[in-house]
Amino acid sequence: GADETLSTCGEESGEVRFLSGAHECEWYGISCDGTKSITKIAFERNNLNGHLPEELSSLSNLVTLSLEKMSLRGTIPSSLGFLVNLLSLDLDFNDLTGTIPPELGKIHGLKLLDLNDNNLSGSIDALAGFHHLLFAQLHHNRFSGQISVSLGDLLELRAITLFGNDLTGSVPRSMCTNRVENGGTLQHLEVDCGGESPELVCDCCSQCWTESPTSHPTYSPSPLPSAHPTPVASAPPSISAAPTPKCNMDTVSRAVFLQSLLRDVSDPISMVTEGSAQNRAWTWLLDGDEMYTCPTDSNVVQRYVMAVFYYSTLGDSWFSCADNNNTPCPRGADTYRWLTGANECNWFGVDCDINGVVTGVVFDDNDLAGQIPAEISHLYGLEVLKLENGKIGGTIPSSLGDLTSLRELDLDFNLLTGSIPQELSNTIQLQVLDLNNNYDLTGNIHPLSQLINLQFLQLHHTQITGSVPGEFGGLKDLETFSVYATDLEGTMPRSVCRNRNTLGGQLINLQADCGGFNPEVMCICCSMCFPIRRMTLDTAAVVMQPTAMPVVPPPQGVDVEDPEHR
């Protein structure tokens, strides 16, 4: 993203280089809200060096600051404490020094703090100010002193890793009280409590590590109740005595590695928000999946995304092949219910290539509802997405623009709202686009004018507005183009008319609201003209009849080649 010609940048996804003439919201790694206010700065392995500037505190609406796996030096600016809207701070795997500024404790809403694998020192008392903290990874630093009893007040904390530091004393009983086996929320608590002479004494930790940060963890027995004070370190089982765990790692390490793989797929906050599709998918992948996916498996992200899709489209209510035995499912050697232990390539409606990469998700009349999740953009090999005749609502995710291999997108007869995202113009391989009969779909169709490989485009029975852009004449492969029963108006561009098959082009079916005595669209070349009829869900069953004269003739005196009417 640098302002250099030799550096790579994600222009194909609409991102542009830093310090270019484009708005900063379009720069690589930057996300903004609807008011063009920066809400996210995210980089990973982008060779960032130098220091974090104090001026970052002026980005008052910043929600995520993720600068991981870099070479950043210096201290964490105390001015970051002014970022009161920050939810996620990820600075792991850098070369940061100094202490955690106490001013950061002002960010009471912070939910994720990743500072592991730096050279930070001092106490960790500042964490007590993060009242809504969910995840904290501070391992492999030089933090010292004792763990404050006030950390027991972090009642929403799910995981905290403190091993590989210089902390001493005992883990406060208040933190043990918050462990899940005691009715709390703390699932993962990892410190240097292993070995014969542990740095820390802990009788409730989920993982005890030896003093050396490079050593393997000791495998502690199942978490002890708070009433049993025998320290884990008093009789640590040896690694050789423990059975070989699945994935060659214990369950806690597996969870940490899986989480790190998925942090760029889903918002970490959504993954821990109870009841969300992301949280249900994460819980299933971690504990409910019979396949027991390992972090080293090539399909980790793909399998998680498919689970998010299932829960986001209310899979438990599907007509066929839901994750229950109450719905029918076609019997076959390669057809299984969703969320079974079978490979996701064998789930109903899923197609894959020979490498096990999902290339198609195809459903027709399976009662899909809910919303299409943004995570589907991580199915990088997806070529066909057909979700017809359902109850899918919400907007079309802008992240679909990342599916550069997509050839067919069929979402007709659903309940989609909002506009066609500009990012969809990036799917330049798209040949078929069906969005018809989504009665609350609005906005203009300008993003589609760049889809030069389009052959089939149906937008009828929507509320799209504006006019047909003249650039649509560049869609030379287009064979069907239907925009009747919409709010389009104006004149069908002459450039589109020149593509009609009657004039030697490919366009066979061209349908618009060009019928009746006062047509919304003037079209001298349409194959079918419909009268104006505003369609709603209440009138959706009414079949619109074209006018007896299928084509409105050009006004008298208008030359087909007159440039004023192009």
Image (cartoon, grey):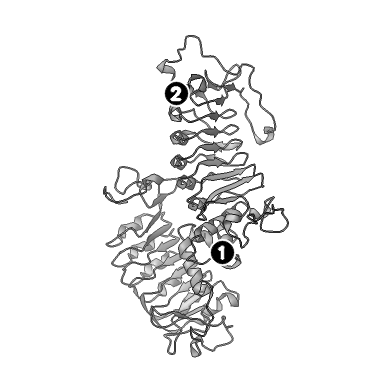
Name the one closer to the observer, 550 or 29: 550
Give the residue at x 48% y 41%.
421
> Is residue 133 visible to us here?
no
- Give the percent coordinates (x, y) of residue 504: 48, 21
- Give the percent coordinates (x, y) of residue 246: 54, 73
- Give the percent coordinates (x, y) of residue 439: 61, 36
> Is residue 503 visible to us here?
yes
Name the one closer to the observer, 44 or 519: 44
Question: What's under tag 1, amino acid-wise?
Answer: Leu
Name the element at disc 2: helix
Which numbered disc covers residue 285?
1
Give the residue at x 50% y 81%.
219
Horizontal relation, residue 308 to residue 74: left or right: right
Residue wearing tag 2: 495
Question: What's under tag 2, amino acid-wise?
Answer: Ser
Which residue reaches farthest right? 326
Image quadrant containing the C terminus: top left
Q: Residues within 10 Å of mark 1 (few under 14, many from 20)?
A: many
Q: CA distance from mark 2 to mark 1?
A: 52 Å
Q: Residues within 10 Å of mark 2 (few under 14, many from 20)?
A: many
Name the element at disc 1: helix
